[in-house]
Amino acid sequence: MAVSIYTTPSCGYCQVAKKYFRERGVKFTEFDITRDQRKADEMLHKSRQGGVPVIDFNGEIIVGFDQGRLERLISKSNN
């Protein structure tokens, strides 16, 4: 399972998403787009928009915190 999350420090939903992953034992890589312009550009290329969080879950891009979709993806990855 390859999970990346693009965040900003002031994003409440970013915090919720990271907590959600930790509670479920999902390892992820976080990229703070306020500190890394290259990752900010990468996020824009992947999502085609500038809002965070942007989650790359095994190549599937999720904009925002969509718990139902994440649960389905986690379940699918664990089978």
Image (cartoon, rainbow, N blue to C red):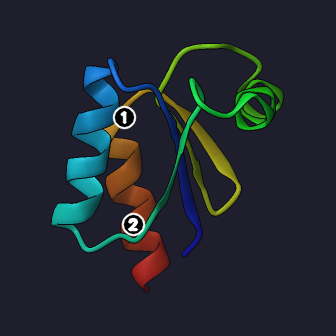
Q: Is residue 51 left or right of residue 67?
A: right
* Residue sitting at x 39%, y 50%: 70
The image quadrant of residue 17 is top left
Front one among 67 and 4: 4
Mark identifier at residue 79:
none
Q: Total number of numbered labels?
A: 2
Q: Residues within 10 Å of mark 1 (few under 14, many from 20)?
A: few
Q: Position of residue 67 (x, y in %)?
A: 29, 41
Residue at disc 2, secondary structure = helix
Q: What residue sits right under mark 1 in the picture? A: 66
Q: The disc labelled 1 sits on which kind of residue?
A: Asp
* Residue sitting at x 30%, y 48%: 18
Q: Position of residue 71 (x, y in %)?
A: 32, 56
Residue at disc 1, secondary structure = loop
Alpha-carbon distance for marks 1 and 2?
12 Å
Q: Position of residue 69 (x, y in %)?
A: 41, 45
Q: The disc labelled 2 sits on which kind of residue?
A: Ile
The image quadrant of residue 25 is bottom left
For the residues bearing labels 1 and 2, Cβ distance under 8 angstroms: no
Q: Residues within 10 Å of mark 2 (few under 14, many from 20)?
A: some
Front one among 24 and 34: 34
Q: Is residue 3 left or right of residue 44?
A: left
The image quadrant of residue 16 is top left
Q: What residue sits right under mark 2 in the picture? A: 74
Q: Position of residue 7 (x, y in %)?
A: 47, 32
Front one among 16 and 7: 7
Q: Quadrant of the N terminus?
A: bottom right
**Residue 68, above or below 25:** above
